[in-house]
Image (cartoon, helix red, strand yellow):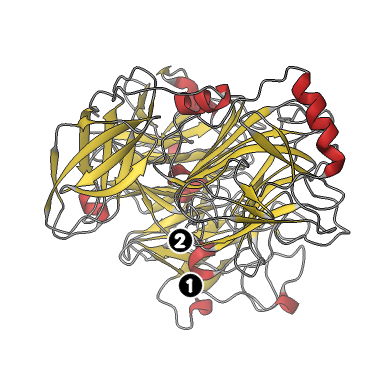
């Protein structure tokens, strides 16, 4: 039997006779992907029934052990939470969405508590926060311990997304692990969208959902409980379409017997032995399309609200057929799309198989995931090199106030695994503001664009940087031998150095030397003459900035220096190094898609296959520069590409974007908790 607190009975009667019209739950919606639906019309004693059919009934309780308080809502009746009594609804589930999630609810709150938790989902022992929506006066969302609170103002005068004020508002939060896209809707209108939110980790399906308070915070002393009303709470394991969200926010019944048209223009492409990207065009419907069922070989393999899908489970060497069926808000199904067939490659690495114009995200490939390493080695103005002898990307960094460790890390593209190449100098030997630690290994530094690989010598070059502690611009010049045993003995200090801060460098495959810019000087470094390795080629007038990157066209003997934002002029600089004793050049006027010149330490390489320079500074497009015409071109991915790389590190990409000559692909990694990405240049280039 429905339980209503007697203290609220008069208020309900008065509300009713004030001509507030309450719509009944004849409102219909597609049940596809709906794993929990509390309409709060089906409340018996302390049980809140789940009308989705999945049995996720909630148990209501508060610290005074009172019955649920039910009041007129937007759709039938709503439940009222008292933030003083810490009222909550709790349910243990084993089917929480892991890859795609949509959370929808009506809220009405006068709560002034900034913490006010609307919903919390935690691990079974409640130790790990997996999903949380909180803050009616400044909405925040947490997914797998990664938290965002969109602010459209300033730090001093923030402008948040608000759902308070004592009025009914409809809230939707959707998230897709692919690309980490999170979207927040208020009253059917998109208020915010971001990427890279918990894209490296799926949400565990087993845990505890608590509505009205944080699942971990059940103490009466905690002030983060929600105060106000809720109605029509839904959790889906798919994305909702914009039209579906608009309809939910309208709170109007849906009477629809007409199915959508069939999806059109279905495309599919194999990007590895086991993975295929699918993309199609949304069909027409008299009301709205809510989502899509995806079939492989006539077997349902997924449901989504997006017009694209990644199949992670192809059989290597097999030929698979795909089709897509649309469904609308009333669960009317369309006819199937035209089938397309895809043959999965029988063998080979994704680096060999990846079609031109596509990005690929190596799943579960972050350093945090594989090694549990959390120090910020990449984000602190740091770069890397590509070891072409072993097919691996090597990163090194830290320094100043970021991290004092000096170990080398490498991602092996044969195994798709991270490894730590060298031990870290013991903590008690990491002395601040020195160039060499007490154990003889180099101090930790911001490495900027000062790292290069010497393939003929199989050595790693590192020069300059902002040293741990003081941030002084020195850091020394070092060569590291990858064949050294023990590994830590591979470091050799080059006494005669030209180190500095904000340097840029490039390996010259024609000579085996390294060109290096620092403090307005341009040097050439000869690794075969370590008694006197440096030769000054330009003195005092070369380009300089903390945010430049460089590469060399070995055919035309041109060194190009890109960027200069955040302390320098956005520009392209070209030096003619064909005569090392008489280097000429400087800032050039380029044409075409010159916006890349505003980049902040972009990834920048020369691609001998396309015979052009290639730059990447975020998004799924790259830029190419033709040396002769000085034309920048923006290269968009193919229409079947579904992956956008993670956002570049705030302080720059530097040498963590590298060309792999043996595979004709590019690789990039943007942070210790970000996956590795692979890209093959578009075929139309």
Q: Is residue 585 above or below residue 295?
A: above
> How would you rate the neighbour count of disc 2 (Cα within 10 Å): few for under 14, some for 14-19, many for 20 or more?
many
- What residue is shown at x 79% (from left), y 45% (from top)? 115
Left or right: where 358 falls relative to 200: left
Do callouts 1 and 2 mark residues in contact (Cβ within 8 Å)?
yes
Query: Which is more toward the observer, 657 or 328?
Result: 328
* Residue at the disc numbered 1: 421
Q: Say which quarter of the image contains residue 156.
A: top right
| Place of residue 259 in the rendered image (x, y in percent of width and height, measured from the top left) | 28, 25
> How would you rate the neighbour count of disc 1 (Cα within 10 Å): few for under 14, some for 14-19, many for 20 or more?
some
- What residue is shown at x 59% (from left), y 45% (from top)? 42
Q: CA distance from mark 1 to mark 2?
A: 9 Å
Q: Is residue 631 above or below residue 463?
A: above
Query: Which is more toward the observer, 67 or 155?
Result: 67
Residue 394 image label: 2
- What residue is shown at x 41% (from left), y 22% (from top)? 255
- What residue is shown at x 68% (from left), y 79% (from top)? 426
Query: Which is more toward the observer, 254 or 136?
Result: 254
């Amino acid at each position: 039997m429905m339980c209503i607190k007697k203290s609220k009975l008069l208020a309900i009667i008065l509300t009713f006779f004030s001509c507030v019209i309450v719509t009944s739950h004849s409102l219909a919606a597609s049940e596809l992907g709906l794993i929990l639906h509390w309409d709060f019309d089906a409340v018996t004693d302390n049980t809140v029934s789940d009308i989705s059919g999945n049995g996720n009934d909630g148990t209501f309780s508060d610290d005074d052990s009172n019955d649920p308080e039910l009041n007129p809502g937007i759709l039938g009746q709503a439940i009222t939470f008292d933030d003083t009594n810490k009222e909550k609804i709790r349910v243990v589930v084993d089917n929480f969405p892991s890859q795609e999630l949509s959370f929808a609810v009506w809220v009405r709150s006068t709560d002034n508590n900034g913490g006010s938790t609307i919903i919390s989902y935690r691990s079974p022992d409640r130790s790990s926060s997996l999903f949380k929506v909180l803050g009616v006066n400044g909405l925040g969302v947490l997914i797998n311990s990664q938290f965002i609170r969109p602010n459209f103002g300033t730090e001093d005068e923030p402008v948040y997304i608000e759902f308070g004020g004592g009025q009914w508002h409809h809230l939707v939060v959707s998230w897709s692990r692919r690309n980490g896209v999170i979207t927040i809707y208020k009253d059917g209108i998109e208020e915010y969208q971001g990427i890279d939110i918990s894209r490296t980790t799926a949400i565990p399906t087993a845990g505890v959902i608590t509505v009205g308070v944080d699942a971990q915070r059940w103490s009466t002393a905690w002030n983060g409980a929600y105060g106000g009303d809720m109605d029509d709470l839904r959790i889906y394991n798919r994305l909702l379409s914009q039209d579906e969200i608009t309809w939910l926010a309208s709170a109007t019944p849906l009477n629809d017997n007409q199915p959508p048209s069939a999806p059109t223009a279905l495309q599919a492409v194999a990007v590895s032995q086991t993975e295929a990207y699918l993309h199609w065009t949304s069909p027409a419907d008299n009301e709205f399309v809510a989502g899509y069922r995806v079939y492989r070989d006539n077997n349902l393999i997924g449901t989504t609200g997006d017009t694209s899908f990644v199949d992670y489970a192809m059989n290597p060497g097999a030929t698979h057929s795909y089709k897509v069926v649309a469904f609308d808000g009333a669960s009317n199904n369309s006819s199937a799309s035209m089938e397309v067939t895809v043959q999965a490659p029988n063998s080979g690495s994704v680096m060999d198989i990846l079609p031109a114009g596509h990005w690929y995200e190596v799943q579960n490939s972050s350093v945090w995931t594989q090694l549990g390493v959390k120090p910020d080695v990449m984000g602190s103005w740091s770069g890397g090199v590509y070891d072409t002898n072993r097919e691996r990307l090597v990163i090194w960094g830290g320094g100043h106030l970021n991290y004092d460790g000096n170990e080398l890390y490498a991602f092996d593209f044969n195994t798709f695994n991270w490894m730590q190449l060298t031990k870290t100098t013991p903590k008690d030997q990491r002395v601040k503001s020195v160039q060499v630690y007490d154990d003889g290994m180099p101090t930790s530094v911001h490495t900027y664009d000062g790292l290069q690989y010497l393939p003929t010598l199989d050595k790693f070059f590192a020069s300059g940087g902002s040293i741990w502690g003081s941030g002084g611009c020195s850091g020394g010049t070092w060569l590291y031998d990858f064949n050294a045993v023990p590994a830590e003995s591979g470091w050799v200090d080059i006494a005669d150095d030209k180190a500095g801060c904000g340097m840029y460098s490039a390996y010259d495959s024609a000579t085996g030397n390294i060109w290096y810019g620092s403090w307005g000087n341009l040097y050439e470094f000869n690794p075969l003459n370590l008694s006197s390795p440096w030769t000054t080629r330009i003195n005092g007038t070369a380009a300089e900035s903390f945010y430049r990157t460089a590469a060399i066209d070995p055919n035309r003997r041109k060194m190009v220096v890109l960027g200069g934002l955040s302390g320098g002029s956005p520009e392209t600089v070209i030096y003619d190094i064909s005569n090392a004793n008489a280097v000429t050049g400087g800032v050039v006027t380029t044409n075409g898609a010159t916006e890349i010149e505003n980049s902040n330490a972009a990834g920048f390489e020369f691609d001998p296959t396309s015979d052009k320079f290639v730059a990447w500074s975020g998004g799924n497009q790259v830029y190419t520069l033709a040396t002769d015409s000085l034309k920048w071109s923006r290269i968009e991915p193919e229409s079947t590409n579904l992956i956008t790389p993670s956002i570049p590190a705030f302080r720059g990409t530097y040498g963590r974007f590298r060309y792999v000559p043996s595979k004709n692909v590019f690789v990039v990694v943007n942070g210790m908790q970000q996956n590795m990405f692979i890209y093959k240049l578009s075929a139309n280039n």
